[in-house]
Amino acid sequence: MNDRTQGSEDLIRCSVCDDYFRGREAYTCPRCRRQNICKKHRIAGFRECASCVFESRAREIRELKQQQDSIKSFLRLTQFAFIVFAILFITVRAGIADVVEFLQYSIITENLVYLGAASVLGYMLFFFILRNQNSQVREKEEQLQREKFRMAEK
Ligand SMILES: [Zn+2]
Ligand SMILES: [Zn+2]
C-alpha cells in the first residue's frame, strides 16, 4: 500500500518521450533547458541530454569536414605550385630561359629547387594533417552511431 501511494504521488511526465517516471529522477538539461527529462535521454558521462550531445557531436563533425575541404584546396594549391616550379626549373635547365628574359635574373629562378622542395614538404605536411582529420571524423561518426544505437535500444 505504501508503495502505491508513493508511486502515484511521485510520477511526472517526461517532456521528451511522454513516459511517466519517478519525480526524483527528473533531470533538467543545462543546455537546452528542457525540464523533466527521464533518464532514458541521458548519456553516461554527459551533463547534457542525448539530443544536445548528438547535436554538438554532429556540429563537430561538420566543422571537421569543412576544415578538410580547406586542407584539400590547399593540397591542390601546393600541387599546382610544384608543377609551376618544375616547369620553370626545366625551362631554366633546358636553356629556354635565355629566351625568356624575365626568368634570367629573378629570385624565383635562383631558388627554384628550394621552392619545389618547399611545396613538396607543404604537400606532405598537409597530407598527413588531412589523414589525421579523416580518421578523427570516422572515429567521431562511429562514436555517434554507437551512442544513437544504444539510445534506441533502451
Ligand atoms: Zn523520456
Ligand atoms: Zn538538452
Image (cartoon, grey):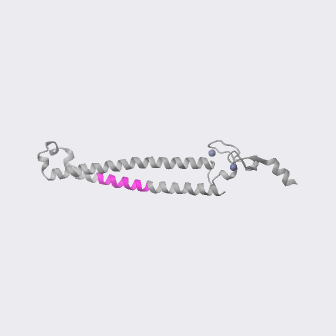
What residue lies at 38% left-to-right and 50% top-to-bottom? 72
What residue lies at 52% left-to-right and 46% top-to-bottom? 59
Is residue 15 found inside the magenta-colored segment of the image?
no
Give the magenta range: 119-132
Residue 102, quarter of the rendered image: top left
Is 136 on the left-hand or right-hand side of 103?
right
Q: Quadrant of ligand 2?
A: top right
Looking at the rendered structure, the number of numbered marks drawn on it comes to 0
Is 134 on the left-hand or right-hand side of 23?
left
- Of 87 and 117, nearer the camera is 87
* Picture quarter with the N terminus: bottom right
What residue lies at 41% left-to-right and 48% top-to-bottom? 69
Where does the image place residue 18, in percent across and percent down from the top left? 71, 47
* Picture quarter with the C terminus: bottom right
Dominant SS in magenta: helix
Where does the image place residue 121, in percent across and percent down from the top left? 31, 54
Is residue 124 found inside the magenta-colored segment of the image?
yes
What residue lies at 50% left-to-right and 50% top-to-bottom? 61
- Of 88 and 150, nearer the camera is 150
Where does the image place residue 17, in percent across and percent down from the top left? 69, 48
Residue 152, quarter of the rendered image: bottom right
Is 109 on the left-hand or right-hand side of 59?
left
